[in-house]
């Protein structure tokens, strides 16, 4: 017989402190580092969580909606502990098990695993504010500190784009109609580097219009 778990309000700090989350995120990044990928560990998880949280707050969503977006963003790459392929789907299952153990309500878990399971551009679809915020925040983390390859001659397109960026910032317009990614680079870069990295995600986030997200008016 399984132990009874009282449903409770789970916050991002609860997730960050969890031993399983710590172990899985650490190993997920070690796996990707060995394969030559950019950083997908605690730094990336924390920053994407912060950006997703801020996007929803600036669009007028509730603090709890923003918190759920932050939790989804923090866990979105945890599936890389298993394999890079289909890591969104495996990550959603891992997140489900962790959040259930922590006592999160099932309706909130449903929103989070939907966001995690749909954050990949190859097969994901954004259907609500939380999932769209995670996608935007994920792709907004572009910075040279993400590059884990130390030999510049071995940089791939993701390394080159990230290494060129000194500062990035996501800005939500005052009228809540535009979400812009501002990049400061220290070297010229072919337009194709940036468009190939961001265009597919921009298209998948056409749902980013606040009216489509159900953001409060005013």
Image (cartoon, rainbow, N blue to C red):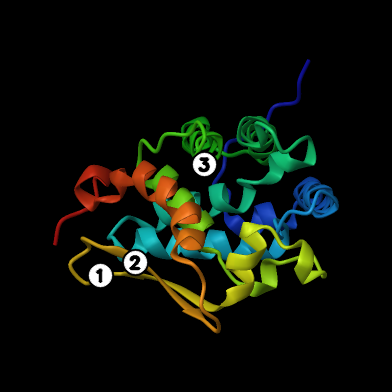
SS category of the residue bearing label 2: strand
Q: Is residue 187 above or below residue 59?
A: below
Which numbered disc flags the more N-terminal residue, 3 or 1? 3
133 or 121, nearer to the observer: 121
Structural crowding at the residue carrying mark 2, measured as other residues with C-alpha within 10 Å and reported as few (<14), some (14–19) or many (≥20): few
Determine the CA span between mark 3 and mark 1.
24 Å
> Taking 91 as reference, is 140 above or below it?
below
How far apart are the two marked residues, 3 and 2, measured between alpha carbons? Answer: 19 Å
Report the front residue among 103 and 117: 117
Q: Position of residue 100 (x, y in %)?
A: 64, 34
Residue at point 67% right, 63% down? 159
Left or right: residue 75 versus residue 50 is right
Q: Which residue is mark 3?
A: 119
Which quadrant holds the N terminus? Answer: top right
- Residue at horizontal 78 percent and vertical 47 percent from the top: 28
| For residue 118, above or below residue 62 | above
Q: Quadrant of residue 180?
A: bottom left
N-terminal-most mark, 3 or 2: 3
Tell me: residue 160, above or below residue 9. Answer: below
Which of the image's four quarters has the C terminus? bottom left
Name the spot of residue 156 as percent of width and height, x first.
68, 58
Disc nearer the start of the sequence (2/1): 1
The label number, if any, that marks residue 180 in the structure image:
2
Residue 146 placed where, x, y %?
A: 68, 67
Q: Name the front one of labels 2 and 1.
A: 2
Residue underneath mark 1: 173
Q: Residue at x 48, y 50 (%)?
A: 134
Query: Quick check: marks 2 and 1 in contact, CB under 8 Å?
Result: yes
């Amino acid at each position: 017989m399984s132990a009874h778990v009282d449903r409770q309000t789970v916050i991002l700090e609860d997730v960050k402190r969890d031993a399983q989350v710590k172990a899985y995120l650490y190993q997920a990044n070690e796996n990707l580092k060995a394969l030559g990928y950019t950083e997908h560990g605690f730094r990336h998880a924390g920053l994407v969580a912060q950006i997703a949280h801020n996007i929803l707050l600036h669009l007028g969503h509730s603090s709890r909606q923003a918190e759920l977006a932050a939790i989804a963003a923090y866990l979105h790459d945890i599936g890389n502990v298993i394999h890079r392929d289909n890591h969104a789907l495996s990550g959603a299952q891992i997140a489900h098990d962790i959040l259930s153990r922590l006592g999160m309500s099932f309706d909130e878990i449903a929103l989070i695993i939907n966001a995690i399971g749909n954050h990949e551009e190859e097969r994901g679809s954004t259907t609500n504010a939380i999932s769209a915020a995670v996608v935007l925040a994920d792709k907004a983390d572009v910075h040279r500190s993400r590059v884990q390859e130390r030999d510049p001659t071995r940089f791939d397109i993701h390394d080159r784009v990230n290494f060129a960026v000194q500062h990035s910032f996501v800005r939500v317009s005052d009228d809540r109609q535009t979400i812009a990614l501002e990049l400061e680079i220290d070297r010229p870069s072919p337009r194709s580097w940036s468009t190939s990295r961001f265009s597919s995600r921009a298209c998948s986030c056409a749902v980013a219009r606040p009216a489509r997200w159900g953001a409060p008016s005013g």
